[in-house]
Image (cartoon, helix red, strand yellow):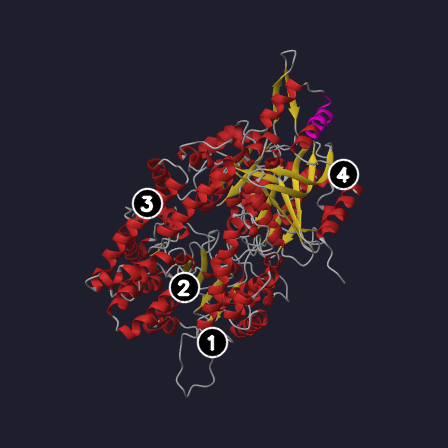
Amino acid sequence: MTTQPEYALEENLINQLEEIGYKKIVIKDEHDLIANLKSQLEKHNKATYSENEFKQILNDLSKGNVYEKAKILRDRIAYTKDDDTTGYVELINQIHWCKNQYQVTHQISMEGSYKNRYDVTILINGLPLVQIELKKRGLEMKEAFNQINRYERHSFTAGKGLFQFVQLFVISNGVNTKYFANNPVKARSFKQTFFWADVENNIITQLSEFANIFLEPCHLSKMITKYIVLNTNNILMVLRPYQYYATEAIVERVKNGNKFGYIWHTTGSGKTLTSFKAAQILTNLEAVHKVVFVVDRKDLDYQTIKEFNSFSEGSIDATNNTKALVKQLSDDTKLIVTTIQKLNTAILKPKHMAKMDPLKKKKIVFIFDECHRSQFGDTHNRIKSFFDKSQMFGFTGTPIFADNSVKNALGKRTTKDLFEDCLHKYVITDAIRDRNVLKFSIEYMNTVKLKEDVVDIKVEDINTAEVLEAPQRLENNVNYIINHHDRKTHGRKFTAIFCVQNVNTLIKYYELFKVKKEAGLHDLNVATIFSYQANSPDEDANGFIPDEEFLDLAAEPESLYETQHRRDKLEAFIADYNGMFQMNYSTNDFYGYYKDIGQRVKNKQVDVLLVVNMFLTGFDSKLLNTIYVDKNLKYHGLIQAYSRTNRILDEVKSQGNVVCFRNLKEATDEAITLFSNKDAIEEIIIQPYEDYIETFNDAVERVLAVAPTFESVNDLVSEKEELEFVKAFRDLMRVKNVLSTFTEFSFEDLGMDAQTFENYKSKYLDLYDAIKSETQKEKVSILNDIDFELELIRRDEINVLYILTLLAKLYESQPKEQEKQRKAISDMLASETQLRSKKALIEKFIEENLPLIGGSEQVNDAFDSFWTLEKKKAIENISKDENLDFNKLVDVVSNYLFTEKEPLRDEVIAVMNERPSLRNRASISERVLNKVKDFVETFINGMG
């Protein structure tokens, strides 16, 4: 059976869209697009526009970028009528979202720096709001994604820029279909493309089924008008299906009654965006007086304040001043974001009663973020009884069930006890299947060795403080982290948390790390934070993570000595931190220190954060991939702690790494079973090392089937064969990326040795270089849109500084050894992505300059002089070849290096001595920008 061609897929989709309510029209180019836009806006607004009136409207539509056009779409455009009165144009009906005009067309041609033809375009009221790109069955979805990125660079901004009104992209190869929000190319990631699903989280992949459900006109316009968030970081965010269903469920419950409810969406699935969207929609309901979003104080100041303010600028009062909250509750503010601590104070303090009493009978909707953490004391009942007409909703990633509830003064209480029905579930197995979070790689380390004659006790069964806190065991664990941290974090591309049982053990661990660092045994940046009060929670090791408390750090009188000891230790550790980062914190500003240390973990300035309980719940960092555990954990505490590591980022971050220095196997299995289902354990934890060896060897066979030797890659005669090699070797790299995080990893276990792997990698990179140069000429190629996933082979520790040490050895070596070392250096330059651009220059230095140096100690200085000269020549050549102002060019490059943001097109054009025509401006500025980027890649990046 032959593969269904792309044009057949396109025709079938258009016919289907006609059947569900779209009108098919023919639009060949921008001229037709604009003519149709005028007629559709007239129809939608029940108006007729003169040539002068429509010229004004079109002028306003032409302004701004994607984000600004998204705001224009949701507003009305004012124009001056021919009779000098003011008219208004509605671009889309947001209140009655089904009452819009729906059309479909295909193969529109747009010409910018290059001419492109787009597959299928959905027009709403004449504006192109959804663009669908199709690939024939069997091709990768990512090729369609990359094709859209090329269109963005080449032609979406062409002419009046109407294609920048696109809100959603859809990509499909017939059997798999995904959608994503429109954003600038640099803000896009294939990780942010989503399958649609039904309310039970069953994904919908077939294009025909997706079209019937997602592209149905009413649903599509509802997604555009209600479920796209304009983030104040100038990006568009579209809700995923489970976020959509949760929001709809909350809104329906508020519309139809006063019952409570909760949302169970697994940790890392984007609960804050869901809760914000629900709150935003509820504020528009007449029956709702106010919506109050309630978080714990630490979550507000650390995580939610940034996220909520990015959705709605200034929506959060982050102070501790309850008076400000009472004012918001009393005035016209509809959406309030506050802390549970301030809310509790507002309803308790007599001085606030005069303003608070009138609210008792008002319908106020409360939404609690991470409702399992702060809702199991008196506060929940106090809020519930004060606001008679209140309606409460909770969000949690790990609900409290009967099995994992902890008894307190009010008895054992569950999430259901507090919030009644679960309105929507999206559990960890759903999120892993959808690739919204990563699987865990869990290693259980035997840290206690028994005598040979003891045969009836397992190492894992030993759980006494005397054994677990033995100095040699703690030192062994520290040595393990020192020896394996770089492997676990891919050369410190990521960072880690180390959680331990109690503060006293933490102090011992920290001091071990410090002594070993001072002895030159490691260079890890280790930082710590802990509560220094005596009798801290979790001293009895029940496996749950208690709430963090920052305000009540006073000790009981009989415990003053222990408290002072811990506080003195923390002061000393903070002093180390201050010295590391030139800060001035102390325990008197504990909360400021807490916020700063969290941000430095996010920025990868802290390699290992040593904690007891802090940062194990609610802390999100995509650049954290490892947690070392020497602490009893269970149920929701365990899942919360492990989940610090499994946020999606890129291909390198293939899993969250968990290294257990205690036997938590049974506790892990119980927690996973509780929070997913009984068959889910294998889905959540990645396979054993031996399984990945088998997978790697299978991938080796596929590579050898295409290219039996690395030299035979040169003999691949067609692009189709080259494509097969790229895919096969890329699969091999993906498996090797996972394997390399295992402690026992060795190439000796694999069906391909390290040198052969490097040889194939060089050929793989040669193909990448070839396609990159062809793409710059815009040659049509089946390799154009393939993702080579170069991040999998970038090793930042191999840089020019490292090469210089090899050059010094080369200088000192005997003639017989020199040729061998030269080849090794040449191979390294060819295989490391950051060094390939420098290969010719470094080899030139070896040939022309190295023989003239007086001694190995002069290699660095000689290379610096050589590099400075070549750098100057390169920038002069760019200036001369492109007729650019040299001084302005240097300023642009300097600014690029300082801000790490690519120069804008206008900045590039400003450097030109002669401004290009409007027709050629995009292509010429892109060419110059590419030369600037190549210059930075060659002379600046990867120098070490």
Q: Is residue 691 above or below residue 386?
A: below
Amino acid identity at mark 1: Asp
Where disc 1 sits, the SS reads helix
User: What is the spatial separation of the Cα atoms under label 4 and label 2, in whole angstroms?
Assistant: 62 Å
Report if residue 453 lies within the magenta region: no
Whole-percent x and y of residue 188?
A: 54, 46
Q: Earlier in the sequence, mark 1 or mark 3?
A: 1
Task: Return the residue at label 1.
Answer: 461
Where disc 2 sits, the SS reads loop
Give the camera-side residue of 577 and 397: 577
Given this view, does label 4 or label 3 mark the residue nearer the observer?
A: 4
Residue 506 in sight here: yes
Whole-percent x and y of residue 574?
A: 30, 52
Q: Quadrant of the N terminus?
A: bottom right
Q: Earlier in the sequence, mark 1 or mark 2?
A: 1
Res. 727 mark? none
Horizontally, residue 420 falls left or right of residue 407, namely right
The span picked out in magenta is: 36-47
Task: Return the residue at label 2.
Answer: 501
Q: Is residue 732 above or below residue 871?
A: below
Amino acid identity at mark 2: Gln
